[in-house]
Image (spheres, grey):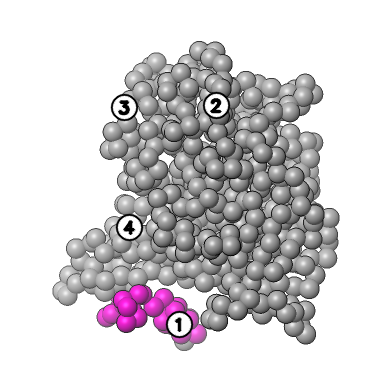
Amino acid sequence: MFTSPFPDVEIPATSIYDDLFGDLTADDAARIALIDPATGAETTYGALKAQVDAFAGALAARGVGTDTVVGLLCPNVPAFATVFHGILRAGATVTTINSLHTPGEIEKQLRDAGATWLVTVSPLLPQAKAAADAVGLPADHLIVLDGSAETAPEHPNLRGLLTEGRPAPDVSFDPATHVAVLPYSSGTTGIPKGVMLSHRNLVANVAQCRINLDLKNTDRVLAVLPFFHIYGMTVLLNLALKQRAALVTMPRFDLVQFLENIQNFGCTYLYIAPPIAVALAKHPIVDQYDISTVHTIFSGAAPLDGETAEIAGRRLGARMMQGYGMSELSPVSHAMPYSRDDIPVSSVGTILPNITCKLVDTETGEEITEIGDDGQTRAGELWVKGPNVMLGYLNKPDATAETLDADGYLHTGDVAVYHEGGYFSIVERVKELIKYHGYQIAPAELEALLLSHPKVMDAAVIGVLDDEREEIPKAFIVAAPDSGLTEDEVKAFVAENVAPYKKVRRVEFIEAIPKSSSGKILRKDLRAREAAAAAG
């Protein structure tokens, strides 16, 4: 068993709202919490807290409470913070939805989560309304944040709800067991599942992250990673609010706007995913902007190679850090401590406080503890235990039991090594997930879709590397005899039915999908086939 190099921190037994806003001082209330680059509008902490309370009051007046699940389909705009924390302040559960989702995908999540309300913005209203109609939500349960009596008269809007001036309700629940958020994750395999994260999970991970991540109230954080993703939710939104930093929101990534926002608003701290690191390291346009205010870049959501990380850090003259986590961990379990400069940036850093880890041999089940002559352990599956570990998967006891053992360890499906310097490196994945631009793609979900095509007899999907060394989905297809099925036809079919990041980007037709005697797809055989083709 491995423990954190840091002493345990206190985890307040409170709601995430009380943890973030309960001790707001007059000085803090005057600080800027949110900046909208589109308009330059600034929201202070005092104004944000008042908006959160008012939104919670408006929801409570409409019957929203501790037994309610509210869907939130919204990009990174300042109103996200108001609505997200307003829902939690009302005692309800938030299920955050990917802004790229199709109506069918939104419908599936609403239905599975048991959501009876949905909150969105005008640009996403068509798909939101289609999904809401499909699950039977009435028009007054679909809130359009930027709507009005002219543009969306049948739906409530944020201005109207806030101006009702209702007080926040008195709510009571156990922070350790009450589900605060319900993001959807594919876990180690399979189709997306609702990850039940309690208020204690969220409060704990903010407290844990404060130790490794040097974020101060003088920092301005560029918030481009989506708040609907657990990484953006905890490490950007909640941690920044806890530290009283300012968040500069970006609804989507655009390199020019990204650089302009850093320059125009003096951003100091960047949370990114690996594709952004590649752009910062290599794109010539970066030199055209004054981004000298940046002192720290933190990469997560997917592995980032050390060389790219070092180049990006040197180019910006900033400290480059990396961490590890997953939705089921709220999400961070490891991060490079800002207080150490002896840890290679290719690693994911040290264990956060209050967490213990194991490395387990994937073949024998033996726990790995011995450090070899090379200064590191053998590779093993990473198991994590701590107050940030999820309650379980919603209505999926079998999947929960496969991931969470009786001792409280979450089996991550990632293979890691421990170094004698006290840090970890992720070396490969046991799990089948594909990580594209930080988004999880479950092969099983794409395979189920492909098998619904009348010209597809069988299908399998694996992750392969493209020319930019980015993992992308590749489909192996067994076509129906004489069907004339083409690669373009397969790609178009998938693109019509899934979010853009899930699109199949390569297709290969084969005679049969390799499978085990039990009928399980042998992805290692497909990966070997791919490797042989690349070598040849």
Tell me if residue 476 comes above or below residue 225 in the rendering.
below
The spot of residue 412 in percent (x, y) is 56, 64
Label 4 – label 3 distance at C-alpha: 30 Å
The image quadrant that residue 480 belongs to is bottom left
Residue ID for mark 3? 138
Query: Which numbered disc covers residue 171?
Result: 2
Q: Disc 4 or disc 3, which is closer to the eye? A: 3
- Closer to the N terminus: mark 4 or mark 2? 2
> Of callouts 3 and 1, which one flags the residue occurring earlier in the amino acid sequence?
3
Please tell me which residue is depicted at 78% across the width and 36% down the height of the picture.
217
Amino acid of disc 3 = Pro
* Circle 4: residue type: Val
**Which amino acid type corresponds to the residue marked 1 in the rendered image?**
Ala
Nearer the N terminus, badge 4 or badge 3? 3
Residue position marked by numbered label 1 in the rendering: 528
Sequence-first tag of 1 and 4: 4
159 is higher (above) or lower (below) than 224: above
Relative horizontal placement of residue 217, taking residue 127 as reference (left or right) = right
Are there few (<14), some (14-19), or many (20+) residues within 10 Å of tag 3? some
Part of the protein shown in magenta? 509-535
Which mark is in front, 3 or 1? 3
Going from the N terminus, do you reach mark 3 or mark 2 first?
3
Q: Does label 2 or label 1 sit earlier along the sequence?
A: 2
Residue 476, percent from left and from top: 34, 72
Give the quadrant of residue 50.
top right
Q: Pick the residue in front: 107 or 280.
A: 107
Residue 469 makes an appearance in the image: no
Element assignment for label 2: loop
